Image (cartoon, helix red, strand yellow):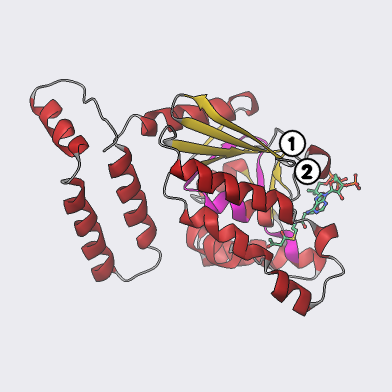
Amino acid sequence: MEFIIVTEQYEPGIALIQLNRPKELNALNRKLMEEVRDTLQALDKNEQVRVIILTGNEQAFAAGADIKQMADKSAIDMLLIDQFSTWDQIRKTKKPIIAAVSGFALGGGCELAMMCDMIIASESAKFGQPEIKIGTIPGAGGTQRLTRAIGKAKAMELILTGRFLSAEEAHFYGLVNKVVPVEMYLHEAVALAREIAQMSPVAVQLAKEAVNRSFETHLDEGLAFERKNFYLTFASADQKEGMQAFIEKRKPQFKGH
Ligand code: CAA
């Protein structure tokens, strides 16, 4: 890997992907995103991994898609390269992904964080979709996901002005789960991952799938989907163990099937 650092077992059950183009504030070039996609595919299949953390460094999660790589492209070049289709894999990942964000999360960086399932932010995090300032618009989900996350009025303001949201504002608007001091953001993400990693991975996967379905369907269909996934958990040994442990007043020992 050239632009990311992967630690498969950062802790038992927790994988860490660190974006690693620090001089360019982790600008997301095509190779970097292909590396993220391939790594996510591999981690999703790796039975030793329960939760994935995606992070950058203190200064930048990512300052957007690589402007220098795109600047001189024609519309047809962009269409044929179709670079954002690579990003779809993030959405297809079955295991939970936590974004641990410090510094800039702008443009594609903000979109990448929003593609994750939860966001832990450092106090220095800055979120925004500043594409308007360079004569374009968000292209990897910003107009859709930011609007769903923080509501139309604020999303419209950010997308039309390119203003940034501070970590505190991002928390206020529900974009991030928690804001912590800079030196704590990765620890906090790991603590969250550790808690989830102890649950039944089957139940975690089915729950994630059901929550995500709520963005894609109407209530009736979403409820039916949830119910089927709920019933499906009863095919797992972990459900039997979980309920039996509750009855016997002990801690469950989930086996992952
Ligand atoms: N693409 C390419 N290079 C980038 C970059 C980006 N998105 N963001 C930063 N860099 C590079 C800079 O060019 C600079 O490189 P050089 O030292 O070689 O000049 C280096 O990273 C450091 O950046 P700055 O000197 O600009 O640092 P700063 O602290 O003064 O400013 C910043 C930081 C406000 C984040 C500023 O870099 C900036 O505005 N970056 C661009 C943000 C942006 O517009 N993002 C959206 C990109 S388009 C997109 O993402 C489309 C989409 O929907 C997917």
Does any atom of ligand 1 lie closer than 8 Å to the CB of label 2?
yes
Q: Position of residue 234 (x, y in %)?
A: 15, 46
Tag count in the figure?
Answer: 2
Residue 127 belongs to the span the image colors magenta = yes
| Magenta span of residues | 111-131
Q: Quadrant of residue 183?
A: top right
Please say whether residue 186 is visible from this viewpoint: yes
Question: Can you see residue 97?
Answer: no
Judged from this view, the residue extending furthest toward the bottom is 76
Residue 138, relative to residue 22: is it above or below? below
Is residue 83 shown left or right of residue 75?
Answer: left
Amino acid type of the residue tagged 1 in the rendering? Gln
Kindly identify which numbered label has been placed on residue 154. none
Q: Residue at x 53, y 56 (%)?
A: 89
Q: Quadrant of the N terminus?
A: top right
**Residue plotted at (71% across, 74% down):** 80
Q: Determine whether label 2 and label 1 are within 8 Å by CB.
A: yes
Residue sitting at 61 percent across and 67 percent down? 156
Q: Secondary structure at mark 2?
A: loop
Q: Position of residue 90 (x, y in %)?
A: 53, 53
Nearer-the-camera pick, 68 or 32 = 32
67 lies left or right of 203 = right
Of the numbered discs 2 and 1, the one sitting upstream in the chain is 2
> Image quadrant for the C terminus?
top left
Q: Position of residue 48 (x, y in %)?
A: 42, 32
Sort mark 2 into few (<14), some (14-19) or many (20+) by Cα contacts within 10 Å.
Answer: many
Q: Amino acid at mark 2?
A: Leu
Q: Secondary structure at mark 1?
A: loop
**Residue 184 locus on image (x, y percent):** 58, 25
Question: Which residue position is annotated with label 2?
Answer: 25
- The residue under label 1 is 59
